[in-house]
Amino acid sequence: MLNELMTTANAAELIERGGKLAIAGPKVDLERLPAGHWIGGTIPYFMLPSGGTVVTDGKVFVTDLSAVGDVHIAYQPADDLAGIARNAPENGFSFTIIPAGSSAHQRFAAEAASYEGAFLKPTVGWIAGVHLSDLGHDTALVYDGRTRTAHADGAVVAYVGLPDDKAALVEIVNLFEADGTDVLTFDETSFAVRRCRVNGEQVDFAEYVRQRGLEHGRLPLVGDFAGARVNVSLQSVGSDGTVALYAPVFPGVDYHFARQVPDYAAAFRDQLEHVSPQGVVLGCNCILNFLYGELEGKAIGGVAGPVTFGEIAYQLLNQTMVMVRIV
């Protein structure tokens, strides 16, 4: 299974040989690739066996899906993201890339859990982004390689159908646990929050965050989704009193802020020590883990892959590592 960083020339050769690929890289490098059976998204950050690094020197990260199963590529517009689950193979997974900051990003985050079949047919993937120094200037893009078309909205999907004797398992590595103090709840689904309830009492959320010294955004909210821990990361605490989030909060979910993680690299190594690499075909990790954990150049184990602006495992996740294993 090919899942590695390579030159654009080598990636182009794989495309021209008919490979069915998922490709991550800077825009300038994705634009050099020929038409073929591939999907792609902009990102210049990657986790490698030796640790995370930034790559802008003519290389892209290629995951070859050809040997995994039967691959069908599609573009889903922002107003029909439910089609990702609707068109998914009965046995397999939908490898999905969505551009950060787009309406598709917002809609998928808020609606994915409600799509028919969403938790029966795995949707996995990541959110495309840009170099952090180019935030506000460059636009995240996804690519339908069949026509070499770049999209600033919508989703590109590689539907991977598996043989009857195989199955796809989605694995999530989350370093964060609830701190066990205040319980936070929210009255509506939103990426931008002004009010919340703390232990049942309505408060100004921005003021609460500042009082707890959490405006740096390093610690996410951890939501309890029927026992599953789902993170929501803080983007900023605005002067207008709005707390901007990288994923939405939902009503009916209990949230806590996360406990501190003193050493991200050690925590990842500890969690991944007993995770077998056998059958792992793709993965991604969050840019916030890369930044706050100072992971550049640090080996953490696990699978190589892009370091992204959000992770997809059935729904949008933050500050997690996602892997797909074929068993």
Image: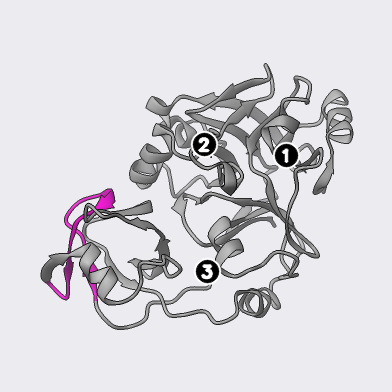
Q: Nearer the viewer, residue 136 or 191?
A: 136
Magenta region, residue range: 183-200
**Local crowd size for mark 3, using a 10 Å CA cut-off: few (<14), some (14–19), many (≥20):** some
Which residue type does callout 3 highlight? Asn
Residue under the image location 28 percent in, 50 percent down: 192
Q: Nearer the viewer, residue 216 or 166?
A: 216
- Residue receiving disc 2: 99
Asked which secondary structure carries label 1, the reply is loop
Asked which secondary structure carries label 2, the reply is strand
In the image, is 191 to the left or to the right of 327? left
Which residue type does callout 2 highlight? Pro
Q: How many marks?
A: 3
In the image, is 289 to the left or to the right of 21? left
Mark 3 vs mark 1: which is more N-terminal?
1
Measuring from the top left, give residue 129's x and y in whole percent.
56, 42
Numbered tag placed on residue 174 in the rendering:
3
- Asked if residue 91 shows in the view, the reply is no
In the image, is 90 to the left or to the right of 55? left
Alpha-carbon distance for marks 3 and 2? 23 Å
Residue under the image location 58 percent in, 33 percent down: 157
Q: Nearer the viewer, residue 142 or 205?
A: 205
Quarter of the picture containing the C terminus is bottom right
- Residue receiving disc 1: 69
Alpha-carbon distance for marks 3 and 1? 28 Å
Asked which secondary structure carries label 3, the reply is loop
Measuring from the top left, give residue 7's x and y in whole percent.
86, 39
* Camera-side mark, 2 or 1: 2
